[in-house]
Image (tube, rainbow, N blue to C red):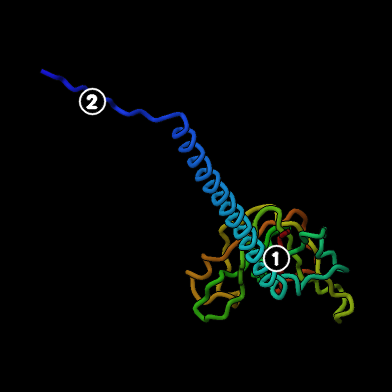
Amino acid sequence: MLTMTSRRRAFTLTEMLFVLVVFGLVAGATMRIIVRQQKFYASTSDLIAMRNSLRDLGEAIPLDLRRISSVGGDIYAMSDSSVDFRLATGISVICSIGALRTTVVVPPPTLSSRTALTTWISAPTTGDTAFVYDEGAAGGVNDDTWDKVAVTAALSVGSCPTTSGYTANATEAAAAQTVTFGTALNANVVVGALIRFFRRAK
C-alpha cells in the first residue's frame, strides 16, 4: 500500500522580498499622501484664521477705531500686528452725586419711556476709565472740560428717585446703579452731567 505525502509549498526568499518591496512602495506612497493632506489642512486652517482676523479688523475699524484720537491719548500702543486703544463701552447721565463726590448714581438702562439714558456695551468695572463732563466755573463753554476719573469698583445698587426726572416709577428708581471712582469729582460736575465710559482693548 502506497502512502502519498503532500508537500506544502513555502514562500521563497525572492517572493518574500518582492512582497516587502511592494508593501514598502505602497506605504511610502500612502505616507506622502498623508503628509500632503496634513500640509493642506494646516495651510487651510491658517487661511481661515487670517480671514477671521481680517473680518474682525474690518468690523473694528469703522466701529471702534474711528472714534479714537492719537492726540487725545486714545492709542496706548501700536505694533505691526496690534493696536492697544481706548474702547468706548457706555454712556450715561448723573442722577445724583454722593456726599464725598466719589460715587454717582446713574439711571437704569431700561426705562418705561423707552428713552435710554444709560447704554452699556459692557457695564463698567474696576480698571475702566470714565470721562465726566465738567461745566467749569464760568457760564460759557470756553472752560468746559471732560474730567478723566478711574472706575474702582463694579456697579452696585443705587437709587435714582423719580423727583430727578430720569425715572418714572419706584421700580425704575430702585434699578439705578452706583458707579465708584478713585478720585473725587470736581465741584463743577453737576447732576445731569454726561459720563462716557471706556476700557482698554487690543
Nearest the viewer among 135 and 11 is: 11
Foreground: disc 2 or disc 1: 2
Which residue: 77% across, 61% down? 83
Quarter holding residue 56: bottom right
Residue 69 image offset from top left, x and y in percent = 83, 70
Q: Is residue 84 visible?
A: no
Q: Which mark is residue 55?
A: none
Residue appearing at x 42%, y 29% in the figure: 12
Q: Mark 2 packing: few (<14 Cα in 10 Å), some, or many (20+)?
A: few
Q: Find residue 169 and report its horizontal and vertical position in percent.
A: 49, 74
Q: Is residue 30 visible?
A: yes
Q: Residue furthest front?
A: 1
Q: Position of residue 18 (x, y in %)?
A: 48, 37
Residue for badge 1:
197
Residue at coordinates 88% horizontally, 75% vertically from top-left? 143
Q: Secondary structure at mark 2?
A: loop
Check disc 1 and give the amino acid type.
Answer: Phe
Q: Is residue 80 left or right of residue 43?
A: right
Identify the image quadrant of residue 49.
bottom right
Picture layout, residue 24 above or below residue 97: above
Task: Pick the quarter of the image with the N terminus.
Answer: top left
Q: Position of residue 118 (x, y in %)?
A: 61, 72
Q: CA distance from mark 2 to mark 1?
A: 96 Å
